[in-house]
């Protein structure tokens, strides 16, 4: 069974976006961007919520041949376009390259995807889809990049949970900006 690995960038007060859904408070350091590149490079597929997919749509527009685009960004844009993306949406969003709309029950769709052979599956989404997949026990690990910024208000990552989420810390990493990656697995999950 393939692993489903959640990754998100958070503020120190647990917000994944400001109150309007924006991310203007975050500018990745090169080593953070390189880490994100590695995640996409190693993923066989990515499951995303529609809002997160819309935010990431920027990478479909980057001119990878432009000399003023930093190498780390060209690399990410290239990897992003190559990676199959499965978008969870109640509507009918515009789909970019290598993206398909998840049809039917999202929990069943993710279970089917996990049952297929291949490399791990990345997950990028907000609070509602995160809570749905957490309740279903489908997320194998949580990678939270906590930035040295507090917003005071915004979109709280764990606001949609209806029960405590107990996690075991499996690793940490500090980046040049002062951001800290916290790697967790569900506390009740046996080692695989």
Image (spheres, rainbow, N blue to C red):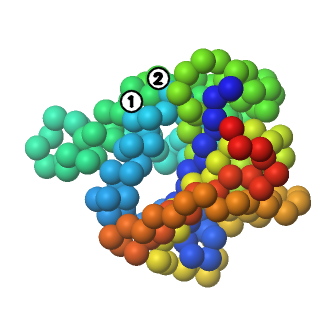
Q: Position of residue 34 (x, y in %)?
A: 33, 51
Q: Is residue 183 left or right of residue 104?
A: left
Q: Position of residue 94 (x, y in %)?
A: 53, 30
Residue in front for this viewpoint, 173 or 23: 173
Nearest to N terminus: mark 2 or mark 1: 1
Q: Is residue 50 left or right of residue 173?
A: right
Q: Return the residue at label 1.
A: 81
Residue at 54%, 80% (x, y): give it.
150
User: Can the viewer see residue 115 in this picture?
Assistant: yes
Name the image quarter holding residue 83: top left
Residue at 29%, 59% (x, y): give it.
30
Q: Are marks 2 and 1 in contact (CB under 8 Å)?
A: yes
- Residue occupying the far top of the picture: 117
Residue in front for this viewpoint, 143 or 132: 143
Q: Is residue 16 left or right of residue 72?
A: right
Q: Return the residue at label 2.
A: 98
| Separation of marks 2 and 1 at Cα, in angstroms | 7 Å
Residue at 73%, 60% (x, y): give it.
167
């Amino acid at each position: 069974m393939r692993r489903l690995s959640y990754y998100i960038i958070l503020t120190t007060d647990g917000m994944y976006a400001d109150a309007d859904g924006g991310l203007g408070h975050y500018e990745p350091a090169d080593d953070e961007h390189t880490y994100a590149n590695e995640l996409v490079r190693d993923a066989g597929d990515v499951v995303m919520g529609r809002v997160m997919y819309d935010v990431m749509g920027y990478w479909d527009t980057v001119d990878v041949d432009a000399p003023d685009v930093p190498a780390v960004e060209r690399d990410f844009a290239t990897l992003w376009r190559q990676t199959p993306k499965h978008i969870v949406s109640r509507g009918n969003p515009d789909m970019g390259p290598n993206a398909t709309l998840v049809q039917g029950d999202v929990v069943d769709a993710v279970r089917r995807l996990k049952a297929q052979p291949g490399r791990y599956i990345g997950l990028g989404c907000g609070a509602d889809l995160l809570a749905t997949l957490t309740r279903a026990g489908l997320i194998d690990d949580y990678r939270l990049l906590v930035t040295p910024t507090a917003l005071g208000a915004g979109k709280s990552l764990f606001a949609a949970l209806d029960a405590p989420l107990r996690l075991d810390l499996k690793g940490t990493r500090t980046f040049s900006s002062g951001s800290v990656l916290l790697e967790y697995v569900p506390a009740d999950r046996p080692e695989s």
